[in-house]
Amino acid sequence: MSKVKNIAVVAHDNCKKELLDFVDCNHNILSRHNLVATGTTGGLVEKMIMERVEQKADEGYEFKPVNRMKSGPLGGDQQLGAMISEGKIDVLIFFWDPMQPQPHDVDVKALLRLAVLYNIPTASNRSTAEFLISSPFFEGEFQRKETDFSSYTQRKL
């Protein structure tokens, strides 16, 4: 994992404000990385970052566009899952709502399953996200242990 990480940010509707506050409070760290997001969340994050860049232009804030996928229920979660399986996502920050059923719950479960399967550092709430980005591994290169799937892919059927 290189020094510049590809960070997926996702939030269910009831958690979007918390994610936006997290991104705002940690913009100085997150701005050094590439953000990828599901559609609605990505639009909100990008808008908030642009506002901060305009407000603090003299403080060296940079604007990097957010790579936006489709909205989660329209396939965005699956797009992020595919990116994880292709090695294109290094970190997943997914503020999901444990109190609200989701119409695309199977997609959410699949995304989280792939993050675990491919050993992607994952934060599902603010506290974990704060711990994750404050780790010394976050700003430097990191060799993530990859699972050997050869026994599965080469099994005899």
Image (cartoon, rainbow, N blue to C red):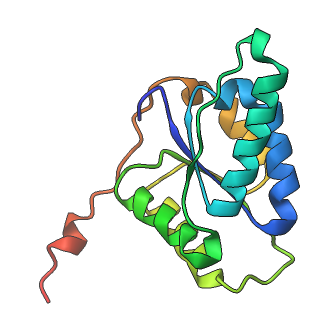
**Residue 10 rendering spot, x and y as whole percentages:** 67, 58
**Residue 60 rendering spot, x and y as whole percentages:** 70, 13
Q: Residue 12 occupies which quadrant of the picture?
A: bottom right
Query: Which residue of the protein is positioned furthest toward the top in this rendering?
Result: 58
Q: Residue at x 34, y 56 (%)?
A: 86
Left or right: 110, with 38 as reference point: left
In front of the other: 56 or 85: 56
Left or right: 70, with 152 as reference point: right
Looking at the image, can residue 79 be seen?
yes
**Residue 148 rendering spot, x and y as whole percentages:** 27, 58
- Name the quarter where the N terminus is drawn: top left
Q: Is residue 38 above or below residue 73?
A: above
Q: Residue 83 occupies which quadrant of the picture?
A: bottom left
Looking at the image, can residue 94 be seen?
no
Q: Is residue 5 above or below residue 28?
A: below
In front of the other: 10 or 147: 10
- Name the quarter where the C terminus is drawn: bottom left
**Residue 21 rendering spot, x and y as whole percentages:** 86, 43
Q: Residue at x 59, y 77 (%)?
A: 74
Query: Which residue of the protein is positioned furthest toward the front in this rendering?
Result: 54
Q: Residue at x 77, y 11 (%)?
A: 59
Q: Is residue 84 above or below residue 107?
A: above
Q: Residue 97 occupies which quadrant of the picture?
A: bottom right
| Number of residue marks | 0
